[in-house]
Image: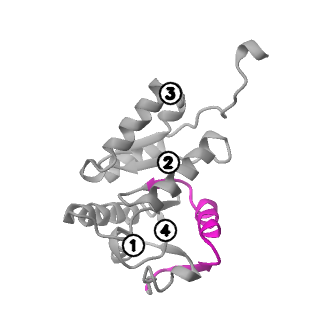
Amino acid sequence: MKSIAVFCGSSRGASEVYIEKAKGFGKELAKRNITLVYGGASVGVMGAVADAVLAEGGQVIGIMPSFLEQREISHKSLSKMIVVDSMHERKATMAELADGFVALPGGPGTLEEFFEIFTWAQLGLHQKPCGLLNINHYFDPLVELFYHMTKEQFLHEKYRSMALVDDEPSRLLEKFNSYEPPAIKTYINEKQI
Protein backbone atom coordinates (compact mmCIF):
# COMPACT_ATOMS: atom_id res chain seq x y z
CA MET A 1 0.00 0.00 0.00
CA LYS A 2 1.84 3.06 -1.26
CA SER A 3 -0.99 5.60 -1.49
CA ILE A 4 -4.47 6.09 -0.08
CA ALA A 5 -7.17 8.43 -1.33
CA VAL A 6 -9.11 10.09 1.45
CA PHE A 7 -12.63 11.45 1.04
CA CYS A 8 -13.68 13.83 3.83
CA GLY A 9 -15.25 17.15 4.65
CA SER A 10 -13.93 20.64 4.03
CA SER A 11 -15.74 21.57 7.26
CA ARG A 12 -14.41 20.96 10.77
CA GLY A 13 -17.53 19.26 12.12
CA ALA A 14 -19.38 19.87 15.38
CA SER A 15 -16.71 18.37 17.65
CA GLU A 16 -12.96 18.90 17.82
CA VAL A 17 -12.62 15.08 17.90
CA TYR A 18 -13.05 15.02 14.10
CA ILE A 19 -9.99 17.20 13.59
CA GLU A 20 -7.91 15.39 16.23
CA LYS A 21 -8.65 11.93 14.81
CA ALA A 22 -8.07 13.18 11.26
CA LYS A 23 -4.64 14.36 12.38
CA GLY A 24 -4.02 10.94 13.94
CA PHE A 25 -4.90 9.28 10.66
CA GLY A 26 -2.51 11.60 8.80
CA LYS A 27 0.31 10.78 11.23
CA GLU A 28 -0.34 7.06 10.75
CA LEU A 29 -0.14 7.44 6.97
CA ALA A 30 3.17 9.29 7.21
CA LYS A 31 4.56 6.74 9.69
CA ARG A 32 3.81 3.97 7.18
CA ASN A 33 5.20 5.97 4.22
CA ILE A 34 1.77 6.00 2.57
CA THR A 35 1.17 8.97 0.28
CA LEU A 36 -2.07 10.85 0.93
CA VAL A 37 -4.16 11.56 -2.16
CA TYR A 38 -7.05 13.90 -1.38
CA GLY A 39 -9.16 16.81 -2.58
CA GLY A 40 -6.51 19.48 -2.06
CA ALA A 41 -8.20 21.81 0.45
CA SER A 42 -6.44 23.52 3.35
CA VAL A 43 -9.55 23.71 5.54
CA GLY A 44 -11.70 21.37 7.62
CA VAL A 45 -11.04 17.68 8.04
CA MET A 46 -9.31 17.68 4.64
CA GLY A 47 -6.77 20.26 5.75
CA ALA A 48 -6.18 18.53 9.09
CA VAL A 49 -5.26 15.21 7.44
CA ALA A 50 -2.95 16.88 4.93
CA ASP A 51 -1.25 19.09 7.54
CA ALA A 52 -0.58 16.08 9.77
CA VAL A 53 0.99 14.06 6.94
CA LEU A 54 3.16 17.02 5.93
CA ALA A 55 4.19 17.75 9.56
CA GLU A 56 5.48 14.17 9.83
CA GLY A 57 7.48 14.46 6.60
CA GLY A 58 5.02 12.51 4.44
CA GLN A 59 3.91 13.06 0.87
CA VAL A 60 0.57 14.65 -0.05
CA ILE A 61 -1.01 14.94 -3.50
CA GLY A 62 -4.01 17.24 -3.84
CA ILE A 63 -6.49 16.99 -6.69
CA MET A 64 -8.73 20.02 -7.12
CA PRO A 65 -11.02 21.25 -9.89
CA SER A 66 -10.14 24.78 -10.95
CA PHE A 67 -13.59 26.11 -10.00
CA LEU A 68 -13.04 25.03 -6.37
CA GLU A 69 -9.54 26.49 -5.91
CA GLN A 70 -10.88 29.60 -4.19
CA ARG A 71 -14.02 28.11 -2.62
CA GLU A 72 -12.25 25.24 -0.84
CA ILE A 73 -9.10 27.30 -0.27
CA SER A 74 -6.49 25.15 -1.98
CA HIS A 75 -3.56 24.00 0.13
CA LYS A 76 -0.34 25.83 -0.81
CA SER A 77 2.19 23.50 0.86
CA LEU A 78 1.47 20.12 -0.70
CA SER A 79 4.07 17.83 -2.24
CA LYS A 80 2.06 18.11 -5.46
CA MET A 81 -1.17 19.82 -6.51
CA ILE A 82 -2.99 18.65 -9.62
CA VAL A 83 -5.62 21.07 -10.94
CA VAL A 84 -8.29 19.40 -13.07
CA ASP A 85 -11.30 20.62 -15.04
CA SER A 86 -14.18 18.81 -13.30
CA MET A 87 -15.33 16.78 -10.32
CA HIS A 88 -15.40 13.70 -12.57
CA GLU A 89 -11.75 14.23 -13.49
CA ARG A 90 -10.90 14.78 -9.81
CA LYS A 91 -12.41 11.44 -8.79
CA ALA A 92 -10.89 9.58 -11.74
CA THR A 93 -7.43 10.99 -10.96
CA MET A 94 -7.75 10.08 -7.28
CA ALA A 95 -8.85 6.55 -8.22
CA GLU A 96 -5.90 6.18 -10.58
CA LEU A 97 -3.30 7.38 -8.06
CA ALA A 98 -4.57 5.47 -4.99
CA ASP A 99 -4.02 1.91 -3.82
CA GLY A 100 -6.99 2.17 -1.43
CA PHE A 101 -9.75 4.54 -0.32
CA VAL A 102 -10.84 5.81 3.10
CA ALA A 103 -13.77 8.05 3.98
CA LEU A 104 -13.52 10.23 7.05
CA PRO A 105 -16.50 12.28 8.28
CA GLY A 106 -17.92 14.64 5.71
CA GLY A 107 -21.14 15.56 3.96
CA PRO A 108 -22.94 14.44 0.80
CA GLY A 109 -19.85 14.96 -1.37
CA THR A 110 -17.82 12.63 0.82
CA LEU A 111 -20.51 9.96 0.66
CA GLU A 112 -20.92 10.36 -3.09
CA GLU A 113 -17.18 9.88 -3.62
CA PHE A 114 -17.10 6.85 -1.32
CA PHE A 115 -20.17 5.22 -2.86
CA GLU A 116 -18.89 5.63 -6.39
CA ILE A 117 -15.58 3.96 -5.60
CA PHE A 118 -17.32 1.29 -3.49
CA THR A 119 -19.67 0.55 -6.41
CA TRP A 120 -16.73 0.36 -8.80
CA ALA A 121 -15.19 -2.28 -6.51
CA GLN A 122 -18.40 -4.35 -6.58
CA LEU A 123 -18.40 -4.20 -10.37
CA GLY A 124 -14.77 -5.31 -10.55
CA LEU A 125 -13.45 -2.04 -11.98
CA HIS A 126 -10.79 -2.11 -9.26
CA GLN A 127 -9.74 -4.49 -6.50
CA LYS A 128 -8.57 -1.89 -3.99
CA PRO A 129 -9.79 -1.77 -0.38
CA CYS A 130 -12.45 0.76 0.66
CA GLY A 131 -12.86 1.80 4.28
CA LEU A 132 -14.62 4.07 6.72
CA LEU A 133 -12.69 5.65 9.59
CA ASN A 134 -15.60 5.73 12.02
CA ILE A 135 -14.59 8.76 14.09
CA ASN A 136 -16.98 9.50 16.96
CA HIS A 137 -19.39 6.83 15.62
CA TYR A 138 -20.06 9.12 12.65
CA PHE A 139 -20.65 6.27 10.20
CA ASP A 140 -22.75 4.07 12.52
CA PRO A 141 -25.99 4.91 10.64
CA LEU A 142 -24.31 4.09 7.32
CA VAL A 143 -22.98 0.77 8.62
CA GLU A 144 -26.49 -0.02 9.88
CA LEU A 145 -27.86 0.85 6.43
CA PHE A 146 -25.42 -1.62 4.85
CA TYR A 147 -26.79 -4.34 7.17
CA HIS A 148 -30.34 -3.31 6.25
CA MET A 149 -29.50 -3.46 2.52
CA THR A 150 -28.12 -6.97 3.06
CA LYS A 151 -31.16 -8.10 5.06
CA GLU A 152 -33.48 -6.75 2.34
CA GLN A 153 -31.33 -8.48 -0.34
CA PHE A 154 -30.14 -5.36 -2.15
CA LEU A 155 -26.53 -5.92 -1.09
CA HIS A 156 -24.81 -9.31 -0.96
CA GLU A 157 -22.99 -10.12 2.27
CA LYS A 158 -19.67 -10.49 0.46
CA TYR A 159 -20.01 -6.93 -0.85
CA ARG A 160 -21.20 -5.52 2.46
CA SER A 161 -18.01 -6.84 4.04
CA MET A 162 -15.98 -4.94 1.40
CA ALA A 163 -16.59 -1.77 3.42
CA LEU A 164 -13.84 -2.06 6.01
CA VAL A 165 -14.76 -0.14 9.17
CA ASP A 166 -12.77 0.83 12.24
CA ASP A 167 -12.43 3.77 14.59
CA GLU A 168 -8.64 3.47 14.90
CA PRO A 169 -6.35 4.39 11.97
CA SER A 170 -3.78 1.67 12.63
CA ARG A 171 -6.39 -1.11 12.79
CA LEU A 172 -8.12 0.14 9.64
CA LEU A 173 -4.83 0.18 7.74
CA GLU A 174 -4.05 -3.35 8.96
CA LYS A 175 -7.40 -4.45 7.52
CA PHE A 176 -6.31 -2.85 4.24
CA ASN A 177 -3.09 -4.87 4.27
CA SER A 178 -4.97 -8.17 4.61
CA TYR A 179 -7.85 -7.28 2.24
CA GLU A 180 -8.88 -9.92 -0.30
CA PRO A 181 -11.43 -8.67 -2.84
CA PRO A 182 -14.49 -10.85 -3.49
CA ALA A 183 -15.38 -12.21 -6.92
CA ILE A 184 -16.82 -9.76 -9.42
CA LYS A 185 -20.52 -9.00 -9.14
CA THR A 186 -22.80 -10.76 -11.59
CA TYR A 187 -26.56 -10.99 -11.92
CA ILE A 188 -26.40 -14.49 -13.40
CA ASN A 189 -27.28 -17.16 -10.86
CA GLU A 190 -26.54 -20.87 -10.97
CA LYS A 191 -30.05 -21.68 -12.29
CA GLN A 192 -29.40 -19.53 -15.38
CA ILE A 193 -26.15 -21.25 -16.33
Residue 78: mark in rendering: none
* Residue type marked 4: Tyr
In the picture, residue 25 is in which quadrant? bottom left
Which of 119/101 is in front?
119
Horizontal side, residue 68 vs residue 92: left or right: left
Q: Position of residue 50 (x, y in %)?
A: 39, 73
Which of 123/174 is in front?
123
What range is drawn magenta here? 77-102
Residue 130: mark in rendering: 2
Q: What residue does disc 1 label?
A: 50
Q: CA distance from mark 2 to mark 1?
A: 19 Å
Q: Secondary structure at mark 4?
A: strand
Q: CA distance from mark 1 to mark 3?
A: 34 Å
Q: Are marks 1 and 3 in contact (CB under 8 Å)?
A: no
* Residue type marked 2: Cys
Comes first in the chain, label 4 or label 3 = 4
Q: Is residue 99 magenta?
A: yes
Rendered position, 53 above or below 143: below
Comes first in the chain, label 1 or label 3 = 1
* Residue type marked 1: Ala
Mark 1 crowd level (few <14, some 14–19, many ≥20, 10 Å Cα)? many
Q: Residue at x 55, y 37 (%)?
A: 180
Q: Position of residue 68 (x, y in %)?
A: 51, 80
Mark 3 crowd level (few <14, some 14–19, many ≥20, 10 Å Cα)? some
Comes first in the chain, label 1 or label 4 = 4
Q: What residue does disc 4 label?
A: 38
Q: What residue does disc 3 label?
A: 157
- Single out the residue that lies furthest toward the top: 191
Q: Residue at x 63, y 66 (%)?
A: 88
Mark 2 crowd level (few <14, some 14–19, many ≥20, 10 Å Cα)? many
Mark 4 crowd level (few <14, some 14–19, many ≥20, 10 Å Cα)? many
Q: Residue at x 40, y 62 (%)?
A: 29
